[in-house]
Image: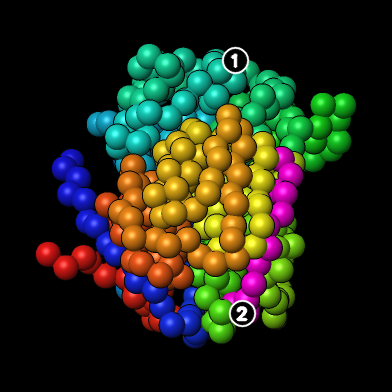
Amino acid sequence: MTHRPLPLVSRKAARLAGAVRVPGDKSISHRALMLGGVAVGETTVHGLLEGEDVLATGAAMRAMGCKVTRGDDGVWRIWGVGVGGLSEPSSVLDMGNSGTSTRLLAGLLATHPLTAFMTGDASLVKRPMARVTVPLEQMGARFVCRSGGRLPMAVIGADASLPVTYVLPVASAQVKSAILLAGLNTPGTTTVIEREATRDHSEHMLRHFGAEVAVEDSEDGQAISITGQPELTGREIRVPGDVSSAAFPIVAALIRPGSDVRLAGVGLNPRRTGLIDTLIEMGGDISFENRRVEAGEPVADLRIRGGALKGIDVPPERAPSMIDEYPILAVAAACAEGTTRMLGVAELRVKESDRLAMTADGLAACGARVEAGEDTLTVHGTGRPPAGGATVATALDHRIAMSFLVLGTAADAPVAIDDSRPIETSFPGFAELMNGLGAEIAEPAP
Ligand code: S3P
């Protein structure tokens, strides 16, 4: 696959105003396709994120025997094959840029008696897979990876898998979910223990499809157990707006005084809202309207008004609830008055890019004072946006790309990014949505 970069440039906006809806939640969309694929009967999904990452999961489920269709009404329908019913894919599964697809599917496949091959783009093939292969091998699967536990990777699923109790060495919902999904087709009870609470969409959705999932406190942390070999039945799912995508218009509105933006139907699962808590602590004017629960997930409409922000310390225990939001938080911090210290953020180094380094380098190029430590990121804000006037490298990382386009809406000089294509993985229509609110994001003049 050839990747032709598409640069974009973002110029200072007067103010941002208007009401929009961000695309569906990426984590929930992946899980809807995977669980729909191993349920019996029809699953309908409203508001599925039609980003490349989720489409990679859909294509993989199709390649393993599930019927996955999109109606003209935008509703997705999946006819599942039942727990343990996936068939061996006849060619390599291309997971594109998506770590979530790769790690969760590795779990699902680990307890099917089949061999599958997975690969991905230049970013994904650098990311560590041992964090999932180690526990899944304990359950009976085998993996052949490139050196350093990297893709391409062969998954040789277990004929007769064994349940495990596994204490997560890193706070990772992807690893937790991989083990729970492997536990689906494993007799007995599979337990994952997490010291720090990570996003719990898998637990919610497994229950929604009819699996038995118990959560209790243990000495080592919260123990999540799944009873193996349930019969899952097709369900209806309404996917809320992705709070990780909402993060970009939220920060864009906050850093342009006079802005007034409304975002409808944003998912507010408390394990995902660390950025919103942090921005409010920084003095951000964010209010919630029409709070409701949809498909077991809390949802609200947000109203964001621009104004002054101040720097704060962001504690390490908050990291799992905002792990994807540090690059855009760093942009907000660069516009705030005072120093923001983000602590315990080492996981940023193994995301779609080394986000600690990419964020620090990009902000420095735009004139901000930043320090990147091993697991800390410190931004010294002056109360005014940094100067801008740079072209920032994005290294196939959608969130780096969107963060710096947001910075460009507030900086005096334009901010360009070398490649906007990765934005398609999670936020199709990002530039159009932002421009609809008053941003000026466009291709650079030739
Ligand atoms: C995700 C979990 C997070 C997050 C990723 C999506 C998920 O990764 O960064 O974008 O859907 O489970 P980790 O669990 O590895 O931190």
Task: Tell which tag, 2 or 1, sits nearer the viewer.
Answer: 2
Residue at x 36% of width, y 21% of height: 154
Mark 1 sits near ligand 1, with its Cβ under 8 Å away: no
Instruction: Give the CA distance from mark 2 to mark 1.
Output: 50 Å
Q: Position of residue 260 (x, y in %)?
A: 56, 83
Between 406 and 291, the one nearer to me in the picture:
406
Q: Is residue 158 magenta?
A: no
Q: Position of residue 54 (x, y in %)?
A: 41, 51
Between 42 and 180, the one nearer to me in the picture:
180
Residue at x 46% of width, y 21% of height: 157
Residue at x 59% of width, y 42% of height: 377
Q: Quadrant of residue 273?
A: bottom right
Residue located beneath label 1 in the image: 138
Residue at x 22% of width, y 56% of height: 6
Residue located beneath label 2 in the image: 305
Between 235 and 137, the one nearer to me in the picture:
137
Circle 1 SS class: helix
Q: Quadrant of residue 76?
A: bottom left
Q: Which residues are magenta?
A: 302-316
The answer to whether residue 421 shows anywhere in this view is no
Going by the numbered disc 1, the residue's amino acid type is Gln
Q: Is residue 309 magenta?
A: yes
Q: How many marks?
A: 2
Rate crowding at label 1 as few (under 14), some (14 to 19) or many (20 or more) other CA atoms within 10 Å: some
Residue 389 got which mark? none
Which tag, 2 or 1, sits closer to the chain's start?
Answer: 1
Q: Position of residue 94 (x, y in %)?
A: 30, 37
Going by the numbered disc 2, the residue's amino acid type is Arg
